[in-house]
Amino acid sequence: MNTQLIEAVRGIVVEQFKSHGADHDFDHILRVYNMAMFLQSKEGGDADIIACAALLHDISDHKLNGGIMNDGGRVSKEILLKLGQTELFADTVAKIVDGVSYKGASVADEAFSLEVQIVRDADRLDAMGAIGIARAFHFGGSRNRPFYLADTAPKEHRTFEEYANDKSHTINHFHEKLLLLQDRLHTKTAIAEGQKRHDLMQEFVDAFYADWHFMGYKESVTAKPGERY
Ligand code: ADP
Ligand code: NI
């Protein structure tokens, strides 16, 4: 592996992530990097491409860059060319960075290479399981969203814009994304690890509803029709 290049990319990424919240901080990048390298050791694929794409995969996220969609590839390419990499290498990583993100329940994932599958699987595994639950509630909390609104059903998003602009409650995010991820993992190694994380989230969501409705919460509140309280 080109450790000099990977150290240089890491140095650039860590600077940009210093002020990010726990749903998307440098710890997320490191977990995705470590998982991607683990998947690479089992599944194969170009290690340098996977390492760079894992480190750069959230470099210009629309939620953090003022709303520009699919900008990470452009920024990644610029970084890699500055670090002396070839056009071909930079373009290959850039295409993966733009292809990694979940874009909505009805938006298909393009599996154009083993490398994109591995980085995408690594990113998705980090959105699942115990850490996935923690990240989701941190995300909702940072935007002051309610945990759950019984009368706001989950949606099946048909476009990235529709998905990205949805400001629903956090439990909906489990139905709109997190519980759908297991069936959208690519590699055998990720599918095996994902199953445990998926089952834990399902158990959590079931327990959440059971706790919520334990004392007939909704029925016991004297809310006006159509109002939350
Ligand atoms: P990806 O890394 O696949 O692009 P995102 O950037 O969409 O994922 O999300 C980053 C983290 O924030 C993930 O853990 C995700 O589940 C969480 N998140 C994104 N949107 C929401 C939401 N509407 N409610 C709760 N958590 C969310
Ligand atoms: Ni990510």
Image (cartoon, helix red, strand yellow):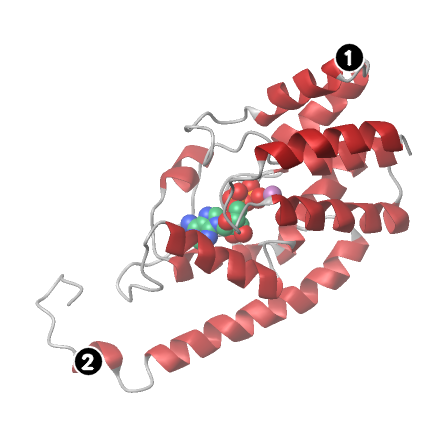
What amino acid type should be assigned to the residue bearing mark 2? Glu
How far is the residue under mark 2 from the one under mark 1?
62 Å
Q: Name the residue under label 2.
A: 219
Image quadrant holding the N terminus, namely top right
Percent of width and height locating residue 188 = 80, 55
Crowding at mark 1 (Cα within 10 Å: few <14, some 14-19, many 20+):
few
Q: In the image, is residue 42 above or below residue 14?
A: below
Which element carries disc 2, helix, strand or loop? Answer: helix
Depth check: 77 or 117 in front?
77
Number of numbered discs visible in the structure rendering: 2
In the rendered view, does 64 fall on the left or right side of 181? Answer: left
Q: Are marks 2 and 1 in contact (CB under 8 Å)?
A: no
Which is in the foreground here, disc 2 or disc 1?
Answer: 1
Q: Where is residue 36 in the image (x, y as percent from the top left)?
A: 77, 46
Q: Farthest residue toward the bottom?
A: 215
* Residue nearest the observer in this picture, 118 or 159: 118
Q: Vertically, is 224 above or below 100?
A: below
Name the kind of residue labelled 1 in the image: Glu
Q: Residue at x 68, y 43 (%)?
A: 120
SS state under label 1: helix
Q: In the rendered image, which quarter is residue 70 located in?
A: top right
**Residue depicted at x 64% and y 54%:** 126
Q: Is residue 208 above or below residue 78?
A: below
- The residue that label 1 is drawn on is 87
Horizontal relation, residue 224 to residue 32: left or right: left
The residue positioned 73% from the left and 26% from the top of the image is: 93
Q: Is residue 46 visible?
A: no
